[in-house]
Image: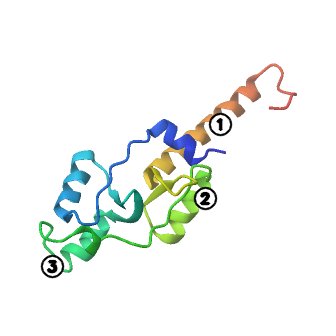
C-alpha cells in the first residue's frame, strides 16, 4: 500500500507557502510562478489555512475584492483538511472526494507542514501502483514457476 510518505519521496518535499497578511496578488503570483493550484497559509510556522485558485474565484473575484489590496486571510479557507505521511493514498482519495478538496497539506507528528499533495499527485501514484501490480501479475503468469505464490 502506497503512503503519502512514498508519494512525497517521488514528488519531492518542496513546499511554497504564503503568510495570511500577504496580498492575494502575491499569492496568485506564486501560484503562477510555480504552476500550482493551492498555497498553504502559514503563520509563526503553523498551518492556518490554504488558498486555492477556487478560493480566489469565489471569495475574491465574485466578491469584487481586488487582489492587490486584499490580504490572503480574507479569502483563504481556514478550516483545512490535512493528512500525515503515514496515511494511505486510498485514505487521501476518500477524504478529497468526500470533502470536495483538491489539495491536502501534509503535517508531521509535531503539526509541522512537510508537503502538499494534489488530487493529480494521488491519482498518478495510484495508477503507477496499479501498473506495478499488473506487471507483477503478468510476470507471475508467464513464469515457469507459476504454480508458486507471489
Q: Residue drawn at (87%, 28%), measured in percent from left and top? A: 147
- Disc assigned to residue 91: 2
The residue positioned farthest toward the bottom in the image shown: 63
Q: Residues within 10 Å of mark 1 (few under 14, many from 20)?
A: few
Q: Which of the 4 image quarters holds residue 66?
A: bottom left
* Residue lying farthest to the front in this orientation: 44
**Eyeballing the image, is 72 above or below 33?**
below
* Color encoding of the figure: rainbow
**x and y percentages locating residue 35 in the rendered image:** 27, 48
Residue 39, by quadrant, is bottom left
Rendered location of residue 99, percent (x, y): 50, 71
Q: Earlier in the sequence, mark 2 or mark 3?
A: 3
Q: Answer left or right for 109 relative to 120.
A: right
Q: Which residue is mark 1?
A: 134
Where does label 3 land, which residue? Answer: 64
Left or right of residue 131: residue 12? left
Name the residue rendered at 30%, 70% in the picture.
55
Q: Position of residue 26 (x, y in %)?
A: 18, 58
Question: 88 or 24, which lies in front?
Answer: 24
Marks 2 and 1, the one that precedes in the sequence: 2
Q: Closer to the camera, 116 or 95?
A: 116
Whether residue 65 is situated above or below residue 126 in the rendered picture: below
Choose mark 2 or mark 1, whichever is in front: 2
As rendered, which of 6 and 49 lies closer to the eye?
49
Cα separation, mark 2 vs mark 3, equals 37 Å
How packed mark 2 is, by other alpha carbons closer than 10 Å (few <14, some 14-19, many 20 or more), is: few
Residue at disc 3, secondary structure? loop
Amino acid at each position: 500500500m502506497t503512503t503519502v510518505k512514498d508519494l512525497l519521496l517521488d514528488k519531492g518535499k518542496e513546499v511554497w507557502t504564503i503568510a495570511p497578511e500577504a496580498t492575494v496578488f502575491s499569492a496568485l503570483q506564486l501560484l503562477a510562478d510555480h504552476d500550482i493550484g493551492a498555497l498553504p497559509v502559514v503563520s509563526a510556522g503553523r498551518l492556518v489555512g490554504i488558498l486555492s485558485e477556487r478560493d480566489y474565484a469565489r471569495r475574491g473575484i465574485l466578491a469584487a475584492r481586488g487582489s492587490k489590496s486584499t490580504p490572503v486571510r480574507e479569502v483563504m479557507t481556514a478550516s483545512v483538511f490535512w493528512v500525515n505521511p503515514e496515511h494511505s493514498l486510498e485514505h487521501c482519495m476518500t477524504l478529497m472526494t468526500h470533502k470536495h478538496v483538491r489539495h491536502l497539506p501534509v503535517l508531521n507528528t509535531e503539526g509541522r507542514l512537510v508537503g502538499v499533495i494534489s488530487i493529480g499527485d494521488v491519482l498518478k501514484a495510484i495508477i503507477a501502483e496499479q501498473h506495478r501490480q499488473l506487471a507483477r501479475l503478468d510476470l507471475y503468469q508467464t513464469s515457469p514457476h507459476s504454480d508458486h505464490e507471489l
